[in-house]
């Protein structure tokens, strides 16, 4: 079974630039999550989708972050404009449904200079 | 969200058992106890979960205290591949499936 795919794996941008991350969940998984993991901390949920609808985006900084999952399969997370404090690993996860174990991708390491 | 407390770090010798503790004194009666681990440069991976009874799977065992205020993840024979950060997470049975990660326990396995 193929795992959660993410790209790119690494990205370096300057502050105020924009960046987008892509995630392809495990086939058939209805629920998709984006997490932000700052160095030395545990992952923090940014947004959760159920199919193509948003379940929880309470921790998403909506003035600069946006995410979509248009066809209920893959998803993109965008930051515009980026700030230095956005430097982190962005993890995508998926699960068959809510309330079951989550499968994580390898993450995208973002460095904002 | 109910809080968990874990030691920042632990060490174990290779091929010896490892007991990773987690305190969750404010756990509600219906919260599940989940464990995930994160190997270096990888995303977290599910290890095990339980509610009241002890649980075993191919990766580990989970021992849950009778009052459910603490639990212990048991790796029966630590290998170098088990070196990771281990997260103990409480999850309610309903609602969004958010996982609230703390800082976890960094396990070092000594060859």
Image (spheres, rainbow, N blue to C red):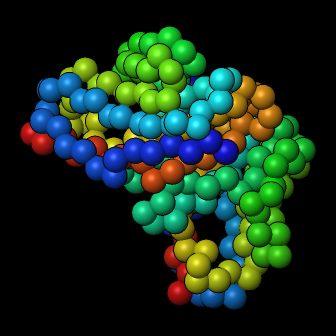
In front: B96, or B21? B21
Q: Is residue B83 above or below residue A88?
A: above
Residue A36 sits in which quadrant? bottom right
- Residue A57 in sight: yes
Residue B82 sits in which quadrant? top left
Count the numbered circles shown.
0
The residue located at (55%, 28%) in the rendering is B33
The residue located at (45%, 13%) in the rendering is B54
Relative image position of residue B19 (x, y in whole percent): 28, 29
Q: Is residue B23 left or right of residue B78?
A: right
Where does the N terminus of chain A fall, quadrant-wise?
A: top right
Relative image position of residue A34 (x, y in whole percent): 68, 52
Relative image position of residue B80 (x, y in whole percent): 21, 37
Q: Is residue A10 left or right of residue B11?
A: right
The residue located at (87%, 48%) in the rendering is A54
Relative image position of residue A67 (x, y in whole percent): 80, 59
The residue located at (83%, 38%) in the rendering is A50
Q: Is residue A24 above or below residue B66?
A: below
- Residue A93 in sight: no
Q: Is residue A18 above or below residue B17?
A: below
Q: Is residue A34 left or right of residue B89?
A: right
């Amino acid at each position: 079974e193929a795992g959660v795919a993410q790209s790119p794996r690494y990205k370096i941008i300057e502050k105020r630039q924009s960046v987008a991350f892509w995630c392809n969940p495990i086939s058939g998984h209805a629920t998709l999550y984006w997490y932000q993991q700052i160095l030395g901390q545990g992952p923090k949920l940014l947004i959760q989708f159920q199919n193509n609808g948003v379940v929880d985006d309470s921790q998403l900084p909506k003035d600069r972050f946006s995410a979509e999952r248009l066809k209920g399969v893959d998803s993109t997370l965008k930051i515009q404009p980026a700030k230095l404090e956005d430097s982190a690993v962005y993890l995508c996860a998926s699960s068959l449904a809510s309330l079951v174990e989550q499968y994580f991708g390898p993450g995208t390491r973002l460095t904002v200079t | 969200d109910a809080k968990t407390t874990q030691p920042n770090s632990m060490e174990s010798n290779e091929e010896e058992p490892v007991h990773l503790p987690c305190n969750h004194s404010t756990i509600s009666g219906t919260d599940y106890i989940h464990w995930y681990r994160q190997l270096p440069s990888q995303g977290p991976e599910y290890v095990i979960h339980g509610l009241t009874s002890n649980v075993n799977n191919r990766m580990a065992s989970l021992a849950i205290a009778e009052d459910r205020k603490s639990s212990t993840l048991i790796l029966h024979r630590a290998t170098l591949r088990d070196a990771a950060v281990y997260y103990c997470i409480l999850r309610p049975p309903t609602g969004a499936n958010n996982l609230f990660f703390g800082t976890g326990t960094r396990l070092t396995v000594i060859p």
